[in-house]
Image: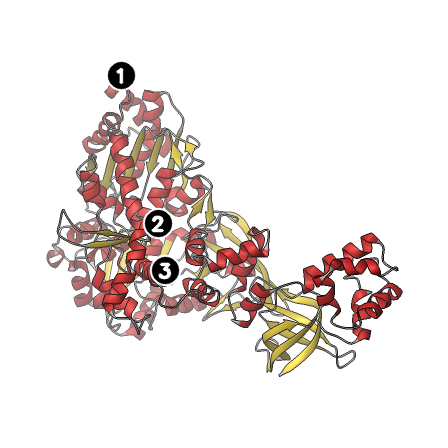
Amino acid sequence: MKIKGKISNFLFKNENYGIAIFNLIDKKNKTLVIKGNISTLALNLIYELEGENVIDFKTNKPAFEVNNWKLSKNFSKEIYIKYLSSSLFPTIGKRTAQAVVEYYQDDIFNKILKNKQNLTEITELSSSQIDIIFDVTNKYFGDKKILDTFVKKNLKMEIFNFLKKICLEENEMLSILQNNFYEFAIAHKLKSFEDIDNIAIAFGIEKNSPIRVSWWAFKIGQDLLFETGNTWFKLDALLKKLKSYFLDLKPTEIEEKLIYAKNNKILIFDNGKIDNIKKIYTYESYSDEVFIANTLNNLSNKLIPNSEFDFEAVIDKVESYVGETLNISNFKYNKEQKNAFKSFFDNNISIITGGPGTGKTTVIIGLIKFYKLTYKKKNFSVMTPTGKAANRININNEFFATTIHKFLRATGNDLFEYNEFNPISKNLLIIDECSMIDNRLFASLLKGVADIDKIVLVGDKDQLPSVGYGNLYEDIIKSAKFAITELKINNRQIIEKENNSIIALANAIKNNVISQFDFKNTNNIEFIFDSNPENVIDIIKKIYLKNNPTSIEEQLSNIQIIAPMYKNFLGINNLNSEIQQLINKNLHQGYKKADSIFMINDKIMSTENDSSLEIYNGDVGYIKELNFSKNKLLNSKLVFNSIIKEVNAKQFMKIILSYACSVHKTQGSEYNTVIMVLDPTNYFSNLFLNKKMIYTGITRAKQKLYIISSKELFINAASKEMKKRETSLTTKLIENS
């Protein structure tokens, strides 16, 4: 179905989608609502639209869904006169417009563009009016081949708009699109790859060309790294997936075309001279490992003069300061912790690893004071991967811990204001929760900081590794290149003269003796071995009500359900719904997003970094306000870290419910009470769960831990080694020393 008319105003639009009021030319005073990929259309220009009549599912009212469109350029004399005398052509009145139409008769806009000089023959036009007519005609009716191609091929308009912003001329844009658009798009972090590929094909790339095969290999390589956490992959795995995209190419032909990827460093091929394993890296995964290894080795070998001082006297001052700060009388560091201070002084790079309750945070607080006293410097920063972990350290005004993303001033898409071209100067970096940091982020951090004299890496090597590729913290430790202090003595005893069962369980898992653990005699763990999902839901509700604080702020950090799976009855999604209905009796209007409903006072979590709001992935808060217009969410007020953030509807898409969440999402946090739910009825539980996941989950609990599972599943999961990540940072650290 085709219609013809002009847009009078937009009701809504973003870079890819729009809703507008459309005035039909053929039917006077007849308007309708149109929607679709129309955001680049201009007001008051006449378009021919192709599409179909539909019923809008939100408003339940008729609308016209636009599938394709083109700008009308040929009209009757009457329409031409209306166009030329409209607000599009300032200073051109009806009489002047009539003179132009009478001169050209037909195909007027094309004739104007073909020869501007002919306008001077119209005596009614001044020189300024000639410029106006030509410039406006060129703007709206000039060659729009690129835009037409994007529209006809249904290409992503967000990318077109990006190109339009950075290109001065259409020829420049066309050159980018026709000359290895993949390289440009990847360098500028454009998404998605499928959209990039469609654009490249539309502008002339051959489907089986070496360029296209190589960039698909890059995309598949990235996917393999994300799926496995490895930093490299094998040729067989790459060819197997590439074959599904290039069905008419033989594996030998695909392999031959990958020479382009090798020559242009899209992929890095390692022949395995050292370990006889042929590896393929993406350029980023390879350069990250090389840069990290070179930077750490160079820093380790850097000569930094140390002043003489009385170690014990300085430690006494530090202990007095820490005791006063933490309100602990007669505070003293144990021998292991003192070794961390000696290691810090003696080495440019020092590593502190230890389980829960071993005093890592207490050591960090003391190291800052120690650094100030011994080096007389204040140019340092303390950072963590998450805001929750940073808040744990921020207990006084001596320093302010922040997230790595905030420290580097993240701008989105793994880009930062502080980078290799614009580094910030810091002499000391102390980084906590290092097991959560992937290679890409750590390389970005090292590139974004200049003048580093010392780095302290703090974490728990037995926790889950990062979500992104690499096994950074463990790889650095395994290299044995740097001073390591392992904290084993536990300081977290909640019951006088009794062991902390949470710590005992963590040690049993870590030391592979879970089968010997006494499940009956525990003081702060309650095991509930039940395989009936309906029983389990009832049990979870009772436990939650029993332990849930009345204050919303306290609920954020005092209690947390942790579950490894999202689906099924005992998955995260359903648990969030069940607990929401149990404790949030708010009667105000809710906001439905996907399968979830969000209401005022709901506990929520951010799933992405948003530097404009200073909200980061994993931050937990609650909903204070939801503001609607005609049942559509306009904006909201969310509270994170006791600060109210005004969040629009688009930004709200990054928010999820957080009564229950995954183990990875809780990493870096601690809660007074943790309810860990393992689902024995989910087939994937036995495949997915492992000892690092269980260890990380249970060590989020400070005072009380509930474990709900079948006994068999829990013991199997707590005994199962996590699949080893294939990385080469350890080797590069040793090789490049």
Check disc 2 and report the residue beneath it: 669
Is the residue 166 above or below the residue 13 in the image?
above
In terms of secondary structure, where does tag 2 sit?
loop
Q: Quadrant of the C terminus?
A: top left
Check disc 1 and report the residue beneath it: 309
**Alpha carbon separation for disc pair 1 and 3:** 62 Å
Check disc 3 and report the residue beneath it: 211
Q: Quadrant of residue 293?
A: top left
Is the residue 355 above or below the residue 117 in the image?
above
Residue 499 can be seen, yes or no: yes
Is the residue 663 above or below the residue 154 in the image?
above
**Alpha carbon separation for disc pair 2 and 3:** 45 Å
Q: Are the two marked residues, 2 and 3, in contact with CB atoms closer than 8 angstroms? A: no
Which residue is at 24% across, 52% downward?
269
In terms of secondary structure, where does tag 1 sit?
loop
Which residue is at 31% across, 48% downward?
438
Residue 678 can be seen, yes or no: no
In terms of secondary structure, where does tag 3 sit?
helix
Specify whether 161 is left or right of 314. right
Between disc 2 and disc 3, the foreground one is 3
In primary-sequence order, the first of circles 1 and 3 is: 3
Q: Position of residue 457 (x, y in %)?
A: 28, 38
